[in-house]
Amino acid sequence: MFYRLCGGSPKHFGDRVKHFITFNEPSVFVGLGYKEGIHAPGLKLDTRDILTIGHHVHLAHGKAVRKIRELVKDTKIGITLATSPVLPENDSKEAVESARTELTLAAIFSGRSWTTLNGRKALTRVSE
């Protein structure tokens, strides 16, 4: 179904539009919709299911890219990622180093959550 839908916009606008995205912020709809249950469809699945869903999003992205390239020559196609800076919880050397190496996608799968500390966004461990 998604593959068939991918041809619509490029087919109609490809003569004028040369930049397309396939998915908008998949980490948000996968993480918050299927892991946390905050967004639709409101499920709380286990890590294996989340990884399977993420895998299928990437497969669908690949198929969509092929479809769009068939329809629009000289196009640029991407996926929009949700990214945010990761700031340290405090000024300790350990917290600063941790913030430098933390990835947003890892945050979704590691039980961390965004919060505001001292007026800035930071990752903190979610208490269970």
Image (cartoon, rainbow, N blue to C red):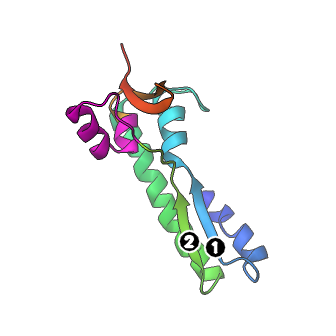
Question: Residue at 55% of width from left, 49% of height from top?
Answer: 25
Q: Residues within 10 Å of mark 1 (few under 14, many from 20)?
A: few
Q: Main secondary structure of the magenta part?
A: helix
Residue beneath disc 2:
77
Q: How far is mark 1 from mark 2, CA to CA? A: 6 Å
104 within the magenta span:
yes
In the image, residue 78 above or below residue 118: below
- Which quadrant holds the N terminus? bottom right
* Residue farthest left in this picture: 94
The earlier-in-sequence mark between 1 and 2 is 1
12 within the magenta span:
no
Q: Amino acid at mark 2?
A: Ile
| 112 displayed left or right of 66 | left
Question: Residue at 65% of width from left, 82% of height from top?
Answer: 72
* Residue farthest top in this picture: 128
Numbered disc 2: secondary structure: strand
Q: Amino acid at mark 1?
A: His
Question: Residue at 47% of width from left, 33% of height from top?
Answer: 121
Q: Are marks 1 and 2 in contact (CB under 8 Å)?
A: yes
Between residue 96 and residue 12, name the one nearer to us: 96
Numbered disc 1: secondary structure: strand
Residue 62: where, in percent of width, then height? 48, 66
Question: Residue at 76% of width from left, 80% of height from top?
Answer: 16
Instruction: Identify the magenta region.
Output: 86-108
Q: Residues within 10 Å of mark 2 (few under 14, many from 20)?
A: some
Residue 75: where, in percent of width, then height? 60, 80
Residue beneath disc 1:
19
| 114 displayed left or right of 14 | left
- Which quadrant holds the C terminus? top left
